[in-house]
Image: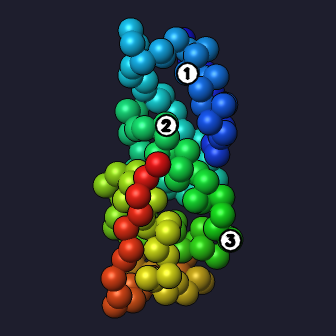
Amino acid sequence: MGETLKFPATTEEVQALLKRIGVDGVRYEEIFITSFDGDVLGLYDHLGEYESIDELNHLAHVLSDLDQSDIEKFEAVIDSGEYTGSVHDLINLAQNLDCYDFYPGISGTKPETNGWLTPKPQRWSSVSLP
């Protein structure tokens, strides 16, 4: 049985969806995601079918707070393949975009790249997930 959940979602929306698909935490605990759809270019390439709904929702909340220039910077970093090993990494990346300079419109090494990305020499701050 499949359902669609639009992120970011409220706790009540997530719980209602889990109830509708029969995930009760006792008999059925696991879900899998069959597709991702969104406006952040390339993000779905770094997401798997067994991701945590809570982490995905948290990532969506963080991304929804970014302005367009930070979204473009986020897309450039994930295109480079850095910090994309998990949803937790993507959340940390989204909250540490100030560690990068991004110059849109400058041709990169790949034809699809629409900007030049350089990391700043500083430490990242790690976040705790709810």
Q: Which residue is mark 3?
A: 67
Residue type highlighted by circle 1: Leu
Q: Is residue 97 above or below residue 4?
A: below
Of the two numbered discs 3 and 1 on the same chain, state the one appearing first in sequence: 1
Return the x and y of residue 123 as percentages of the image width and height.
33, 82
In the rendered image, which quarter contains the N terminus? top right
Residue 53 marker: 2
Residue type highlighted by circle 2: Ile
Q: Determine crowd level at label 1: few under 14, some 14-19, many 20+ residues with C-alpha closer than 10 A.
A: some
**Nearer-the-camera pick, 100 or 105:** 100
Q: Relative to residue 128, is residue 43 drawn left or right?
A: right
Return the x and y of residue 40 as percentages of the image width and height.
58, 57
Q: Relative to residue 128, is residue 107 drawn left or right?
A: right
State the SS at label 1.
Answer: helix
Q: Is residue 3 above or below residue 1?
A: below
State the SS at label 3.
Answer: loop
**Mark whose residue sits in front, 3 or 2:** 2
For the residues labelled 1 and 2, the Cα–Cα distance comes to: 10 Å
For the residues labelled 3 and 2, the Cα–Cα distance comes to: 24 Å
Badges 1 and 2: C-beta atoms under 8 Å apart? yes
Of the two numbered discs 3 and 2 on the same chain, state the one appearing first in sequence: 2
Badges 3 and 1: C-beta atoms under 8 Å apart? no
Return the x and y of residue 70 as percentages of the image width and height.
60, 73
Q: Which residue is mark 1?
A: 18
Q: Relative to residue 17, is residue 79 drawn left or right?
A: left
Q: Is residue 14 above or below residue 25?
A: below
Q: Is residue 103 above or below residue 45?
A: below
Q: Residue at x 62, y 36 (%)?
A: 11
Q: Residue at x 47, y 30 (%)?
A: 33
**Mark whose residue sits in front, 3 or 1:** 1
Return the x and y of residue 17 as percentages of the image width and height.
61, 23
